Image (spheres, rainbow, N blue to C red):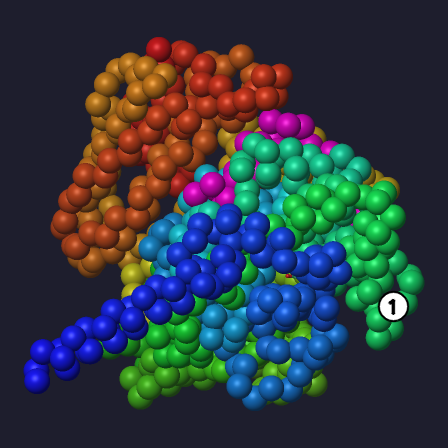
Amino acid sequence: MLKPVKTLFSILLAGAISVNLAGQSNLPVYLNENKPIEERVEDALSRMTLEEKVAMCHAQSKFSSAGVPRLGIPENWATDGPHGIRPEVLWDEWDQAGWTNDSCVAFPALTCLAATWNKDMSALYGKSIGEEARYRNKNILLGPGVNIYRTPLNGRNFEYMGEDPFLASKMVVPYIQGVQANGVAACVKHYALNNQEIDRHTVNVNVDDRTLYEIYLPAFKAAVQEGNAWAIMGAYNRYKGQWACHNQYLLNDILRDEWGFDGVVVSDWGGVNNTMQAIYNGLDMEFGSWTDGLSEGASNAYDNYYLANPFLKLLYSGEVKVEEVDKKVRNILRLAFRTTMNTKRPWGSFGTPEHAAAGRKIAEEGIVLLKNNGVLPVDLNKTKKILVVGENAIKPMTVGGGSSSLKAKNEIAPLDGIMNRVGKQADVIYARGYVGDPTSEYNGVKLKRDLHDSRSAAELIEEATRLAKDADIVIFIGGLNKSDGQDSEGNDRKELNLSYGQDNVIAELAKANKNLVVVNISGNAIAMPWINEVPSIVQTWYNGTESGTALASILMGDANPSGKLPFTFPVKLDDNGAHKLGDYPGVDKEETYKEGLFVGYRWADKENVKPLFPFGHGLSYTTFEYGKVAADKKEMTADGKISFTVNVKNTGNRDGAEVVQLYISDLKSSLPRPVKELKGFEKVTLKAGEEKTVTFTVDKTALSYFDDKKHDWVAESGDFEAIIGASATDIKSKVGFKLK
Ligand code: GLC
């Protein structure tokens, strides 16, 4: 009896298995995830009509583009931005859709991430923001931005990773990998040479090849070749007279041919200006066009996109070969298989305490202690009355600044953070000090707090200085605020100095109480005419949801500051190459980067200009001592490596972290080179009294420069120096070596 049943069972089981296998093999190739992605791309492409192909190449709404419903290929949904997931907007508007479930965690601005000099923080950031994008069902995150900080006036530097191509190249990679592990494409922007907001839609940037390859491209190249970015966003500006969103040089020659990029090129919103260039010069997906005056905002506006009906007509007539649209669609299908059609990708999470905690950790690691004559950390055993002054202590910063603006589920402003932290241990009182911009609204996201204050500047200063007189410590919290001309997209700052009379408030407070701390919130350097009167200065950033918590933990000493500046603070604008030699912001929409390679500390070294605070600078509540750097060989071969070791000791009485920086100097080169260039960094945590050995191992790429004649990287034999610094000017030791 048993035998027949067993046989029947085994037949059924075998049948089930074969059906299952057959099921997989019965799937069309493009739906079969066991098949190689390129086979799936070709199979899907072969099934698509011309109209379906063209529809994929342009937007169908403000932030989405068509899929192929007939084949089960989903739409693509993009979302801003680099610091968090933008609230949902109406189908075809920038205005709010009014959802009640899209309040996100706002993460720190990318200047803060860069200031951590900690690749683990970048990985944590990418993972967290990727989970938020995934949960909101967006498959293209419009970030990170890695444009180089050429001038301290650029409105969008707060969205980028500083002035040095090596730092940006190293910090952008883990972020991308973290985002894409969620099945969401990072869309690295704005490629390339978008280094100012003035005339951003029209300026034609002239820059020599060496500067382009050595300064402005490396972070994008790392994003593609190390980060394996699945998307790149073209910039608005022109380069060699062609719009960056459809640019033969940047997109076809460099991105595709030299770097081997296999992802999609997305335009910036409104960055497309010409159908033929869009077809032939490397663009895949057109977003945000205002249509060329054909029918702004008409219901069929998307049909009028450069890559919509005009493209289809050219294909129908045969003037443009189908191969041209197939190239684009292959890239878009690859995006789909990597994201929306990847059935194994995680589900994400949104607005969670874990993400808020991640933002706080990144903020605590990115806050920079610029100066400290003993006032910090605040000793709550001795401090009974703390006065907090300044609009930025109460002004939420997650709203505003342009497309990176957010609708945050929560935001702890600095004053809230300080009050929460101090509790009953001391009295915390607040004085406005100045009124900057009491409004804060972006695309319909309004601030909950009403910041209006009708008192005069004199009244506000009188109140602040009066209260300062009998406070134990005064903490001024000011800076920029992401309003127009104050670190925001679409316009640059007009000057290096703070606005709203803040310099005067600070000077008056310094007279009223010598225990003054100035906290500057910004994404750019500022001038500090009061620097000699202020014993302690903290540089902090637009740090999102946990801004106030992170700042309080640094000020009260719970966390030991370990951030380092990702850009130079010049004393005055003329100490910056873009302004001294220029020709920022350009003339008649033409701009030539005459300062060339000499950006940031490279300029300071070349011109012997002493910065207010140098690139890589940041203090701690403990102290560190460096040993002498040693090389493992005197001479390295072109195909070899060389290692440098240096001991670092925490000589203070509390745990801390130090960023050890390796610069390389080419003592003699046939082409002009910066005095030194960052080629390594390591953030090392040290317990009080602990000593560690840090090792850097480099190959010839760390010695190379771009030879524009050869159009290749060259490492010239000769004498070099490895320089260990705690900043670009705080040089600890050097060791010479030769490249054979
Ligand atoms: C904006 C920005 C870009 C943003 C896009 C969508 O103009 O330049 O960074 O992602 O449009 O908002």
Image position of 347 (left or right of 511): left
Ligand 1 sits in quadrant: bottom right
Q: What amino acid does circle 1 point to?
A: Glu
**Quadrant location of residue 523?**
bottom right
Q: Is residue 270 left or right of residue 216?
A: right
Q: Which quadrant holds residue 587? A: top right
**Residue at (66, 58) in percent of width and height:** 48
Q: Is residue 153 above or below residue 91?
A: above
Confirm whether the magenta stretch covers residue 56.
no
Dot 1, how many residues are within 10 Å of its Cα: few (below 14), some (14-19), or many (20+)? some
Residue shown at 16% from the left, 54% from the top: 688
Asked if 616 appears above or below 297 in the picture, the reply is above
Q: Label 1, on which residue?
A: 296
Residue 115 seen in the current view: no
Tell whether position 212 is magenta.
Answer: yes
Image quarter of the C terminus: top left
Image quadrant containing the N terminus = bottom left
Residue 237, percent across and down? 74, 47
**Which range is magenta?**
199-226
Of residue 634 and residue 729, the one placed in the foreground of this image is: 634
Report the residue at 9% width, 78% height from top: 3
Viewer-proximal residue among 692 and 320: 320
**Residue 226 in sight from this viewpoint:** yes
Which x, y percent locates residue 695?
24, 35
